[in-house]
Amino acid sequence: MPRIAVVNRQLFNPHESQLMADLCPVNRRGEPCITINPADKKIDIDEKLCIGCGICVNRSTPGSISIINLPDELVSLPVHRYGRNGFHLYNLPVPQFGKVVGILGRNGIGKSTALKILSGQLMPNMGGETEAKYEDLISFFKGSEAQAYLERLKNKTIKVSYKPQQVDLIPKAAKGTVKKVLEKVDEKGELAEITTLLELTPILENDITKISGGELQRVAIAATALRKADVYFFDEPSSYLDIRQRLKVSRFIRDLADKNTAVMVVEHDLIILDYMTEMLYLLYGKEGVYGICSGIKSTRNGINVYLSGYLKDENMRFRDKAITFKERAETRRGESTVQVSWAGLKKKLGKFSLESEGGSIHRKDIIGILGENGIGKTSFVKLLAGVDKADTGEIEESVRVSYKPQYLESSSDELVENVLRDAIDKYNTQIVETLGLQFLLTRKVNELSGGELQRVAIALCLAKEADLYLLDEPSAYLDVEQRLIVSKLIRDFMDLYGKSCMVVDHDLLFLDYLSERLMVFEGQPAVRGKATGPFPMGEGMTKFLKELALTFRRDPDSGRPRINKEGSVLDREQKASGKYYYTA
Ligand code: SF4
């Protein structure tokens, strides 16, 4: 059975190196299975000598060593390995001309590595110490679709254009106005058309360093599409965008594919992934340790297989439980105690005005909030918390609010352990371990990735004493698994402690899974906002979707919501009957 040994060099404590070498039974019988690397004083493990006893895994800092037995039938050589005991990637997804193909999988499972290989930015090493040659790769993939693609990459008859995941790094590399930045990459001469389609015209003269995350994302998408290419790669194109923009960007990306052009997308918003792609690959394995790419599947089947946690074709279970949307806790809210109520609220904040006719939040309520950015969602909660006073209207019983902001502060060099002290003392099992934060405790806050920082921020917010918890975009940077873990944590926490929660998010599947009622914010960003609801799920979604002229159905197998094709029979029928959203 092939075995891989991965040492997380960030987590591994070099003071444990000698102990690991002394404990290893293979070392004890005189063979050098664990050796100490003179460069960083941390250990290297010889995968061929290791017998997989697990002693080093159990005796070292949690999460710092992984020893994995791989199924024989699935893998031979990795396509790429980061260093001697680093992450292993097996198999590759392949772009399809004329189609948008998705990649779905956890963070740290090799999606970005695969895209870098396919875009020619990373020459893989096939598990060796040095870069492989295209000839070796081609012979490795002989007879598969990857062979033809790699041959074109080798012959340089394929040109690729790549949108990176972290668009917030763009202002560090690009300088000048948005227009100047885009003009430099406009090989197609379509700047005016594409910037109109992506609603960038009003910000063309703005400096690239002064625009918001959502604007930066759309600039990055425009820059990628403006290049002449045969294959376009988009790594997480929906981050920072609200739902209306996500749909617009999805249609834009879909339209790029034609018989001479292939498009490949990594995306965690399953409704958007479903809407944007025709086929997809699943990447599964263990985050930071190894990733295996599945065979290609239709998008509908691929997402359902992913949610089921079991790959039938590969006979591989990668999650204990299936994720299902049929047992949503829609009827759970029976708690009648009103925690806070309001009526006839009006508030002017500079040029922005906010209003709400009235509503109430009950104990154990989980209220999803839908609406564009800049439309008064945070200002509304500040009124409920008594931080700001309404100009007119009444609030019965202001509540203690704990708030997780949309943008996370990452500059602190404090240890995660110190920042999370309260959460560890009070809710170690329930919050810290559920979110997998026990592996981050010895890291500094400013060293965390976006997804790690998000999980720390959620833990911090929930560990504060409050009656009402407001989480602004908790799904940002999280993968699908983490989004569902966070949903369950929030639901269990509110149930157990009789608290209530409001969640602002743009991932509709996440909100569908989590919320019991919905508030809808309408109006014009930065000008006026009107808060309506809370409504029952179906009513709130219908109100929101009517504005977008979209209808949803439920997938018969997984129960997940799916967007109906515009103008399809179902779409027309549902619009005619006013059922924009099926809750069951
Ligand atoms: Fe040695 Fe492998 Fe056992 Fe670790 S798992 S102690 S490396 S034999």
Image (cartoon, rainbow, N blue to C red):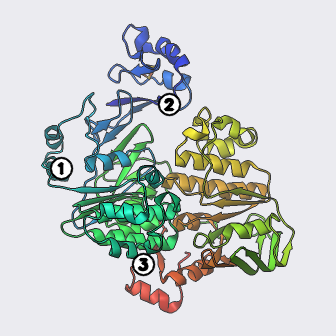
**Label ID, residue 564:** 3
Marks 1 and 2 in Cβ contact (< 8 Å): no
Viewport quadrant of the N terminus: top left
- Which x, y percent locates residue 123? 25, 40
For residue 303, side relative to residue 293 (left or right): right
Q: Is residue 382 visible?
A: yes
Q: Is residue 200 above or below residue 54?
A: below
For residue 516, side relative to residue 248 (left or right): right
In front of the other: 196 or 85: 196
Q: In the displayed image of the protein, which residue is found farthest to the top? A: 30
- Which x, y percent locates residue 142? 14, 45
SS class of the residue under badge 3?
A: loop
Q: Earlier in the sequence, mark 1 or mark 2?
A: 2
Q: Is residue 580 visible?
A: no
Marks 2 and 3 in Cβ contact (< 8 Å): no
**Label ID, residue 469:** none
**Which-is-in-front pick, marks 3 and 1?**
1
Disc 2 marks a residue whose amino acid type is: Gln
Disc 1 crowd rating (10 Å Cα; few below 14, some 14-19, many 20+) is some
Q: Earlier in the sequence, mark 2 or mark 3?
A: 2
Which residue was labeled with disc 1? 153
Q: Is residue 330 above or below residue 476?
A: below
In front of the other: 528 or 342: 528
